[in-house]
Image (cartoon, rainbow, N blue to C red):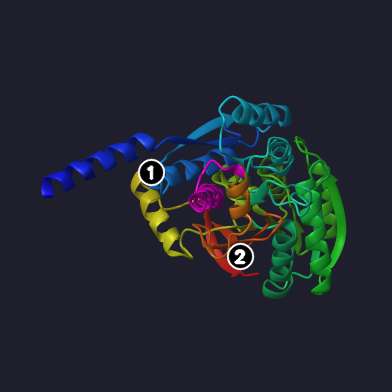
Amino acid sequence: MKKISLITSIALLAASSLMAKEVKVGVIMPITGAVAAYGQTAWAGIEMANKLEPTLKNGDTVKLVLVDNKGDKVETTTAATRLVTDDKVAGLIGAMITGNTQQVLQIADEKKVPMIAPAATADKLLDRAKYGARVTFMDSFQGTSFATYAAKSLNLKTAVVVVDQSTSYSIGLAKAFKKQYEKDGGKILKELKISSGDKDFKAIVSQIGSLNPSLVYMPFYHPEAALIVRQAKQIGLNTQFASGDGVSNDTFIELAGDAANGYFYTDAFDSTNPPTAKSKEFVAAYAKEKNSSDIPGFTALGADSYFLMIDAMNRCENPEDKECVNKQIKSTKNFEGVSGIINIDPKGNAVRSVVIKEIKDGKAVYKDTVNP
């Protein structure tokens, strides 16, 4: 009987092994280009998460298929189409900035493929999307959280807001900040406008100097933010500067140099304050492989995009049933992620906390957490 039982067990194990298959997840990231710092840090998180959970509960292996969109809209559409049509992926992760993410969403909806965005924060991003979700906060929560912190905790009562008029990310974040800042007793002295790719900000920093605000809020991406704060430093302007998660990477600190010290920004994660058991496990694994426990927020969000996708697939009898996976993603409650506890609403938006940091001596330092 024991011999028969052993033979049966071996046969079942062999059959199970033969039945296990490869499930592909497509990843669209800016690995090169102007916003490569975002894509590279998020990809590091996705890759690490895949190493920690390489298989589904049914034994299927999860294979990541990465395509570099170079931060370009056309490249993003091409990448998403290729992943769905040629690579036959069961799900999509990406992109990073809002404009690129909208392109992925369009393809995801057309092809009916579940998609998770790690970092796109625009409030209305998912309003019409049927197959999209995200693991990061929305601009309205990010902007209002820092506005209240600036006005009440930092007691900064006058502000100049600099807006990148070429990105919906910047416009939406600025709008949320201004409304809440004034509600909390702050005064907006002026709104100044720039465009992505600008290099010379002498006129901007000169106007800031003449207005003498206690705060300059710049809700846009790190290339322009670094240039402005450096040029402000060059003319001796010591006003408090702050941004959203667009400067949440080491590249901003490298580009800004000493001018980055004292800079405030909002983020999704701080590795010195891991909020969940999953966070602690991830930080330990990351530190072991990278010899550093300093984990960028986008790395944590990249990991959470993967973990949430896998969690949804595990809740489906067939992990390649795209309708089921999409439904399960949007019914996610109290998900224990690397970046914290995440709840996904019916539209796919994440309800989660925001972290506030300050750069000191070239390092991001945890200041506070704002919960929803």
Q: Quadrant of the C terminus?
A: bottom right
Q: Is residue 75 left or right of residue 54?
A: right
How packed mark 2 is, by other alpha carbons closer than 10 Å (few <14, some 14-19, many 20 or more), is many
Residue occupying image coordinates x 12% and y 45%:
3
Determine if residue 204 is in view: yes
- The answer to which of 266 and 54 lies nearer the viewer is 54
Q: Is residue 337 left or right of residue 222?
A: left
Q: Nearer the viewer, residue 187 or 368?
A: 368
SS at badge 2: loop
Residue for point 79% across, 43% down: 167
Camera sees residue 118: no
Q: Position of residue 351 (x, y in %)?
A: 65, 63
Which residues are the magenta region? 296-322
Front residue of 45/84: it is 84
Q: Amino acid at mark 2?
A: Ser
Residue 180 at x, y percent in the picture: 80, 68
Cα–Cα gap, marks 2 and 1:
33 Å
- When the figure is inspected, residue 332 is found, relative to residue 86, above or below; the finding is below
SS label for mark 1: loop
State the mark number for residue 266. none
Task: Give yes or no for residue 36 being in the magenta stretch.
Answer: no
Q: Is residue 317 magenta?
A: yes
Q: Residue furthest front?
A: 1
Q: Amino acid at mark 1?
A: Gly
Query: Residue 28: x, y in percent?
Result: 60, 35
Q: Which residue is mark 2?
A: 353
- Asked if residue 266 is positioned above or below residue 370 in the image, the reply reads above
Residue pointed to by mark 1 = 59
**Residue at point 54% right, 40% down?**
320
